[in-house]
Amino acid sequence: MKKSLLISATLATALLPFSGCNPPGQKSAGETKTASAGTPAARTYVAPGDKDEYYLFYSGGHSGQVYVAGIPSMRHISTIPVFAPYPATGYGFDEESKKMLGDYSWGDVHHPGLSKKDGVYDGRFLFVNDNANNRVARISLSDFKTHQILGPIPNSSGNHGSSFVTDNTEYVLVASRFSVPLPKGRYADPKDYEKEFNGMLSGIKVDPQSGEMSVGWQILTPPFDWDLGSTGKGPSEGWAFWTSYNTEMAHETLEATSTQGERDYAAVVNWRAAEAAVKEGKATMLDGVPVIDPAKVPGVLYFMPVPKSPHGIDTDPSGRWIAAGGKLQPVASVFDFEKIMAAIAKKDFESEFRGVPVIRYESVLEGSVPVGLGPLHTQFDGRGNAYTSLYIESVVAKWKLPPWTAEEKADLNKVILDKIDVHYNIGHLVLGGGDTKKPYGDYLVAMNKLSKGRHLSVGPSQPESSQLIDVTGQKMAMLYEAFTEPEPHFAQIIKADTVNAIEVYPKADNKHPHAVWEAKDTGVVRNGNKVEVKMIAIRSRFIPDRIDTQEGDELTIHITNVEQTTDMIHGIGIIEQNMNVVIDPGETKTLKVTMTKTGVFPFYCTNFCSALHQEMQGYLTVKPAPTAETAAK
Ligand code: CUK
Ligand code: CUA
């Protein structure tokens, strides 16, 4: 790889918010309200009682959660807790969700990925990554709840480059952002980074029926910091792509050292070949996972040069064009998958790195589209257009995908069709179905990193802004601006009628071993110092509503909400016991508390469920443990 010290300090500085060519001061506050005033409001208006056309699932970054909004209203509808406790739904308090969270109370969600069938969303699951603690979670779109958290994934550190779902949800593909000495737990000095550290690409297998995830296989890589990826589709189905921003293999002052190369690499992965290689016994077990060494198993991994500290790499709906955003170069590099296949077939390689062939850049590059400053991510409308987020410019650029005319090829400025200002410093953007074979092609949401001054002041910690843009016309039109908690990255948009959410848990489906449905089956059973309660919650009482324990007892409550009526939710909050569980209609949850304090602890329903909700309460009593003296009496 060529190294150049000429990496412009100005470009690097320009990556800092607001130092680019479009300082926010130059955009008057009213600018986006011009053109068709009134029209955008009508287009996003969803009258009271009416419903939105699409769901927007956006990642909550280091809040660890996923937020659900409607499009076009952009109204926040619900929060799905994933990697952090969320008292509003009692998540992280009951035994089942506590077990899923394990030892962690936070995560960093960047990229939600919807499950697919034949390359389009099937409305079953939403997978999300945890960049912080190397996990992947599965949310069911039947009840909008987290059902599985897998991880920490062995041999992989910093699960950023996920969750990329293959065309028939065979896998959720995952890449390590950070390289570490392997197996995990081994010490090596970061000074020996190149020799001792490794990255990893992983295939998380998804059970076709249950959606249950397991680690399928892994591919060992040099210590490149893998960034973002996408899965192939159509002709490129069976392949996946990830960018690296540190093929320089810098381990300190990355801002300067990892940006030296004119080009970094993208990983071009044949995941079907990886799957086959593991079946053929060509992998070595490491920490319980079959790991493929690509130097020993040719055909699984290739490197493809990509200019210049790339970030996003996105495959278009046809599966032929792959667009990469080079943060430090004002172009989107477009690669032709057909040419990639031809280069691999002809062994048209420019070099190799640690036994992995490096595809000849000139043979596979279709063109460098001069989109503007700080290109990050690209989405598609299914009509041959691409939309690239420009972080430095605070702009979304619309451009035409190949095939290009000779005239366009001679001057790729001609394929830039439109630009629209966003506020400010856009990260990801999402188009409905934009990563599928069939994008919806109407709405785009720009997820901006900064909202500086565009909302009522809430002090120094400001929300992020997301802006809804209409992309049905030649020109993009700004429709609406919403604010979110820090910090959304990617999102998914799905047609509301593709999702089939249940309204209650049917009694017949409740498999909890301690569920009870009638008062006569409830009760308190003591076994030594273990007190077990089977309880029901029904408008407007708990049965039983008195639980007697003794200091040191371990109290377990299995509580069933026996309602089968939509929206009839009960909760149980126990005063000064740090316990709060919410139970949906037809659901049973288990909670455990050890009685460390003596006294009387009222408990009450936390969800306003009826006119007599306030009366829905009871008492937990805790007597002092018998001392030698009291026991003798
Ligand atoms: S990253 Cu956040 S703006 Cu984690 Cu997908 Cu590009
Ligand atoms: Cu049950 Cu309030």
Image (cartoon, grey):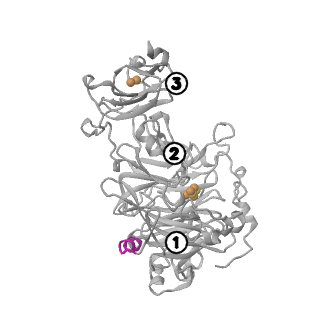
Separation of marks 2 and 1 at Cα, in angstroms: 33 Å
Q: Residue furthest top?
A: 633
Q: Position of residue 67 (x, y in %)?
A: 49, 44
Quadrant where the N terminus sits is bottom right
Separation of marks 1 and 3 at Cα, in angstroms: 53 Å
Q: Could you tell me the amino acid type at mark 3?
A: Glu
Residue occupied by mark 3: 576
Residue occupied by mark 2: 103
Q: Write down the region rendered in magenta.
A: 273-281
Query: Could you tell whether 61 is left or right of 508 in the image?
Result: right
SS of the residue under disc 2: loop
Q: Are marks 1 and 3 in contact (CB under 8 Å)?
A: no
Which one is nearer the viewer's eye here, 139 or 331?
Answer: 139
Residue occupied by mark 1: 267
Q: Could you tell me the amino acid type at mark 1?
A: Ala
Q: Could you tell me the amino acid type at mark 2?
A: Asp
- The quarter of the rendering in which ligand 1 is drawn is bottom right
Q: Position of residue 80 (x, y in %)?
A: 46, 42
Q: Is residue 387 visible?
A: no
How many numbered marks, from 0 up?
3
SS of the residue under disc 3: loop
For label 1, being within 8 Å of ligand 1 is answered no
Q: Position of residue 605 (x, y in %)?
A: 42, 24
Q: Is residue 362 visible?
A: yes
Q: Between disc 1 and disc 3, whose residue precedes? A: 1
